[in-house]
Image (cartoon, rainbow, N blue to C red):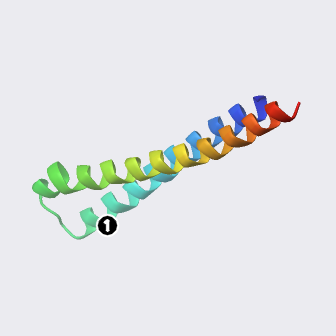
């Protein structure tokens, strides 16, 4: 179980870092393209929400697979 917890901790860190880097790239590109303040008030936040939502769904799917394997191991013993 400790391996699973360490894996989850690592994955959460990776997901947060990747989301942050993607948002930095989106922000730099939109700044280069001279986007208006309305873009940053609405569209940029929407992109961030979708990105975090997709990452959360991927994390939950990975957790579900780990739960299945842990339950299978506990039943085998």
Q: Residue at x 32, y 50 (%)?
A: 48
Q: Is residue 37 left or right of residue 3?
A: left
| Residue 22 x, y percent position in the rendering | 43, 58
* Residue 1 picture quarter: top right
Q: Residue at x 16, y 52 (%)?
A: 42
Residue situated in front as seen by the camera: 72 or 37? 72
Q: Residue at x 44, y 49 (%)?
A: 20
Q: Secondary structure at mark 1?
A: helix
Give the labeled residue for mark 1.
29
Image: 36 above or below 3: below
Residue situated in front as seen by the camera: 25 or 44? 44
Query: Would you call the spot at circle 1 few (<14 residues within 10 Å), some (14-19), or many (20 or more)?
Result: few
Q: Quadrant of the C terminus?
A: top right
Image: 31 above or below 75: below
| Residue 76 x, y percent position in the rendering | 86, 35
Image: 21 above or below 67: below
| Residue 57 x, y percent position in the rendering | 46, 48
Residue situated in front as seen by the camera: 44 or 67? 67
Q: Is residue 19 left or right of residue 14?
A: left
* Residue 10 picture quarter: top right
Residue situated in front as seen by the camera: 59 or 74? 74
Q: Is residue 76 left or right of residue 58?
A: right
| Residue 61 x, y percent position in the rendering | 55, 48
């Amino acid at each position: 179980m400790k391996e699973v917890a360490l894996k989850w901790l690592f994955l959460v860190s990776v997901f947060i870092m990747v989301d942050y880097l993607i948002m930095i790239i989106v922000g730099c590109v939109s700044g280069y393209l001279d986007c208006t303040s309305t873009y940053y008030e609405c569209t940029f936040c929407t992109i961030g929400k979708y990105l975090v939502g997709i990452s959360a769904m991927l994390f939950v799917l990975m957790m579900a697979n780990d739960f299945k394997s842990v339950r299978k191991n506990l039943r085998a013993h």
